[in-house]
Every structure is written in C-alpha cells, then in structure tokens.
Amino acid sequence: MALAGRTAAWWARLRSPRLPTAPLRLPPRLPAACGRPYSSRGKEKLDMSTYPVESIRNFSIIAHVDHGKSTLADRLLEITGTIAKTDRNKQVLDKLQVERERGITVKAQTASLFYSHEGVNYLLNLIDTPGHVDFSYEVSRSLSACQGVILVVDANEGIQAQTVANFYLAFEAQLAIIPVINKIDLKNADPERVEKQIEKLFDIPIDECVRISAKQGTNVEKVLQKVIEKIPPPQCNTADPLKALVFDSTFDHYRGVIANIALFGGEVQKGHKIVSAHTKKRYEVNEVGILTPNEQPTHKLYAGQVGYLVAGMKEVTEAQIGDTLFLYKQPVEPLPGFKSAKPMVFAGMYPVDQTEYNNLKSALERLTLNDSSVTVHRDSSLALGAGWRLGFLGLLHMEVFNQRLEQEYNMSVILTAPTVPYKAVLSSAKLIKEYGKAEITIINPAQFPDKLSVSEYLEPTVLGTIVTPHEYIGKIIVLCQDRRAVQKDMLYIDEHRVMLKYLFPLNEIVVDFYDALKSLSSGYASFDYEDAGYQPADLIKMDILLNGNPVEELATIIHTDKAYTTGKFLCERLKDAIPRQLFEIAIQAAIGKKIIARETLKAYRKNVVAKCYGGDITRRMKLLKRQAEGKKLMRKIGNVEVPRDAFIRVLKRQTDR
C-alpha cells in the first residue's frame, strides 16, 4: 500500500506544470588552435606586396655580453609601434625561461618592424643576437640573412673581446656596419674615449658613431634613420624562382616544424608545393607569415623578406638549418648554407632512469632542431647505461642546454665531466687497420689508446683574445702562463685598456678560465677565443678509482706536467662531493697501474665499546675486531653512489666559498 502511494505521488509531480526555465546554453565550440602557444589562427592576414625590395632592410644587432642589445631591440619595437610602450618591456625578445633567469640572450630572435621615413614605408627585419662567445654560431647564422649590422658598444666599458670578434664576423661577411655607443646616461660614461677606440681598432670615422641611451630612449630614432640610409636593400628579384634559406626552426606539437626563412628570390604562399634541397621531400605550404615578434600570418612572402613557414613537416630531421626550399618542378641552385659548428667541449649525457631513454631521445631531437650547433653521437657506459656523447661550443652552452632540457621538456639527466677532442697518430699497423686511418680523434677518455701504439698525441689549441684595464696585466699574464699559454701579441687600445693575444691549449680554458679571469680583474677583463688547430703534446690518461674500481665517467686526459696536482685536487674534491658511507672509501688517482694521489673517506662508526665499563681489555678488543671485520665485508659488497652534480663540481678548480 505504501509503495502504491509513493508511485502515485511521483506521477503527480511528473505531470504538474513546471516553471519556465532558461534554455540550456552550451559553451561555444573552441577552435582547434585553442591552447597553442602564440597561435596565429584568427588574426587578420597582412598584405606584404606593398613593401618592394627597395623598401626592405635586413639587419642584426651585435655586441659583447651586457652591452644593451636586447634593450635597444625593445626601444626599436616601441618606436615602430610593434609593441605597446609600457614599463614592463624588458628584453621582450628573450622568450626562453633560461634567458630570463640568467639575464643573457641564448637564441637569436627575429622581429619585423614597419617604419615610415620621409614619406616612404619601410619593412625592417631585425635579428637580436647573443653576446657570449659560446653562442657565436647563432650570430654567424643570423648574419647570413642580413645586409647590415648595428654594432653596440658600452660607453662605460668600451670595446671588449666579443665586440672585436663580432665586428670581424660582420666585416668578413661584407656587411654594412653602424657603430652605436650605448649607455651614455651612466655616470662614468666616456663616449669620446670609446669613439677613439672604434676609430683605432675598426678604422670607422668618429662622425659615423651614434650616441644613444637605449634604456631612456635617447637618440634611438636616429639609429633607425641610419639603418635606412646606410644598409642596402637585399639583392634579389620577385620574378625569379622561389629560393628560401632556412636559418632557424622550432617544433610545435600541433603544426610540426616551423621554419624561419629568408627569401632570396621569388614568392611563397599557402597552397604552394615546395621541395627541400636537402631531403628532396615535397610539402604543401599551410601557412606563411612574419614575426612581430609573435606570429602574424600574411597572404604571401616576397623576395627580400624574412618570415616563417609551416608546411606539415612532422619529423624534426626534415628541417635542416641551412637548407634551401624551392617550388616543385622549379629547381634552383641550393644556397651555400652554413659551415657546421665545431664542438669545443664534449660530455656524456644519460637518463637518470633507463626507462626514460626514448623520451630523452625525442627531447634531444627537438632541442637540437632549435640549437643546431650541438652534435649528438650514441654512447653507452657500464655504470650509466645507454646515452649520448654531445658536443658543445663551451661550458656555458652545455649548462644552458641542460637547463633547457629540464625546463622545456621536464627531463632530468646525468652529465659526465666535460672533455675536449684530442687526436692520436697511430704507429701500430694493427690499430691503423682497425680504424682505417693513421690519425684518430678521441672524444671519450675511455677510447684513449696506449702510448706504445701511438707515435704522438695532439691537443686542440685556441687563439684567445683578452681585453683588460692595464692595471691587471701582471696578474693575467701569470694566470695565462699557469695555463701553458704562449703570448702572441699585445696592443694598447688606448691609455687605459690593453688587448692581449695568447695561444691556449683548449683543455686549460674550457672549465673555469673565464671565472678565474673575471675574479683576477674584478670583472673588468673580457675573453674571446677562436679555433687554432692542433699541436703535439705529452698527454696521459688518468683514472679515478673508488675502492679500487675505476669510475669511467671521471676519467680525464691531461698533460704530464699537471698529472700530480690535478690528481690530488680531484681526489680532494671527490672527498667533499661523495657522501660518507658505513664503510671506508679509498679515492685514488691512477696513471696506468701507478697510484699518484689518494684520499680516504672515513666510515660512519658506531661506538661498540660504549657498553663496556671497566673489566678486561680483551672484551673491548673482541668487539672492535668484530666491527672491523663487518666493515671489511661491507666494503667488498658496498656500492659507492656518486651524486649527479659531482661531475662538473669536481672539475671546477676554485673551491666554492
């Protein structure tokens, strides 16, 4: 009866008239591009045909570290109306997290500016470049897409080492050079002195220098006028067949490879069939546009212009930097491309967990697409498993690459001690037959051949340029002599600054020479280097042993004269880096079977005689003997864990204070 009553009440509620309610509104359907960073969907396309070749200027900003390149780029973007003028515009083109954290430019970034001068509309394509010597490959690549450069010099610091190196890169590429003296608003600024330095070193007349303050915006508009007057338009024609140079590229999870291109002939638009000169693969163009500095789609790109292109390249290996793109059935002579970067430092990279190997492989492929100066070779280690041997342009380059892997791809890796590439001239007929050549390159200390089968070893050298105030010359000369350097030249830039040229063994400067130089000169000296070939050297391989077991990742190749001091130093640093265990650890440096240095890391020890209060001495001795036997057994079977960050920390010569 009760059940029948509940059923009747339910039917009555169901039939009763309801209050009117608002119709159910579904959320609007989101476009497919939603959620993509810097998506260009939905933006109005620009017409680039209004900018003929005569109205285009392609230029880079080059300078030493911290001379104000990125700040000048911000002001140029503001003056041309490319970005809104706010107080928050600080290094707008430095988009990477690592660039924000370190305060340096790591990647060259492109931006297109629209500027009206004397009634003519101009398209200015700006490329902001890094200033550190480790990223000079980015600078040389950027210059290939330009016809001129703005050379920025700090009015306080004057000409420094990387200023000289970047000037000669632009000079050899036969580009127009506009000297700009920045930071004239500083208290100690001395633009007259800097103008004399520029005239003496670079043979550029004083009246061509432009004095500015990029931070305050003083005189920055004059720089744009100089760009239009001094830098020639690109030499190309829209009527020619399409010829586009890929000078940079990035990977997008949704659209695949986004290639940054400079057009040296013809035009390109959505729907065109294009072919890669490198892979011979054919693609259909999905989107073209310019960077302002974010992506701005256009109907077409014409000869002389710089922009981006999306063509459905899904594999990272398909977009080679330096490749030439042309229209299907309209082949052209490929552009010369770029001289491949020569690695200066090698290090092993392994996943912390071998199950992450494939994820790390994918992350490496995508990151090396964006940073093509890194070389990658497969490698394996008994202790760390499968991994890679990577080649970098310097130690900072290595640290930045590792940081980008962690931040952009969430990958934790183990990096081994950095080494440099040595060569060995073989004398053994058996080894010559095995390698197929008499001279081999050694990038891993584990491959170092025995002295009996080698006629001579060769080590890489670099020609280093040091620019310093004259009061620090004495200390710097002593430092260079300690690093086995040979002085080649010494030139006074003016009455206060000196330029020194030294021939260094690369192994002596690669880890911490720059730190030591900055410390000795109170931060005023600057350093730059270039490859200078190989020279014969008396080299040996030094192994590090932990309880008699060699640690392959800490093996190093060093000069005979430095063997004992380096071995002792490495043992002392390892003693601080390795955590104490329940058993004693013997840390030894060995050359062949000869031990040249040793440190002992004492074990944690329980006081086993605490319970003895008087009585016979034999009772105490029995307890201590039993403890010693236990420690001995533990030492045989115990594994010594070397912390992840110990490899680089151990090689730093100066102790961390």
Image (cartoon, grey):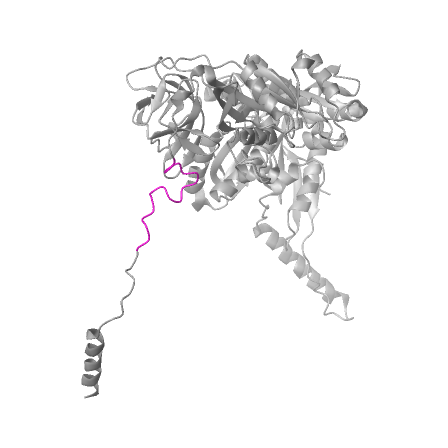
The residue at the far front in this view is 119
The N terminus - image quarter: bottom left
Q: How many marks?
A: 0
Q: Nearer the viewer, residue 582 or 295?
A: 295
Q: Nearer the viewer, residue 289 or 272?
A: 289
- Residue 34 within the segment the image draws in magenta: yes
The residue at the far bottom in this view is 1
Residue range highlighted in magenta: 26-43
- Spot occupied by residue 526 in the image (x, y as percentages of width and height): 69, 26
Residue 538 seen in render: no
User: Residue sitting at 70 percent across and 43 percent down?
Assistant: 599
Q: Nearer the viewer, residue 452 or 467?
A: 467
- Spot occupied by residue 247 in the image (x, y as percentages of width and height): 46, 24
User: Residue sitting at 50 percent across and 17 percent down?
Assistant: 429
User: Residue sitting at 73 percent across and 27 percent down?
Assistant: 156
Name the dominant secondary structure of the magenta segment: loop
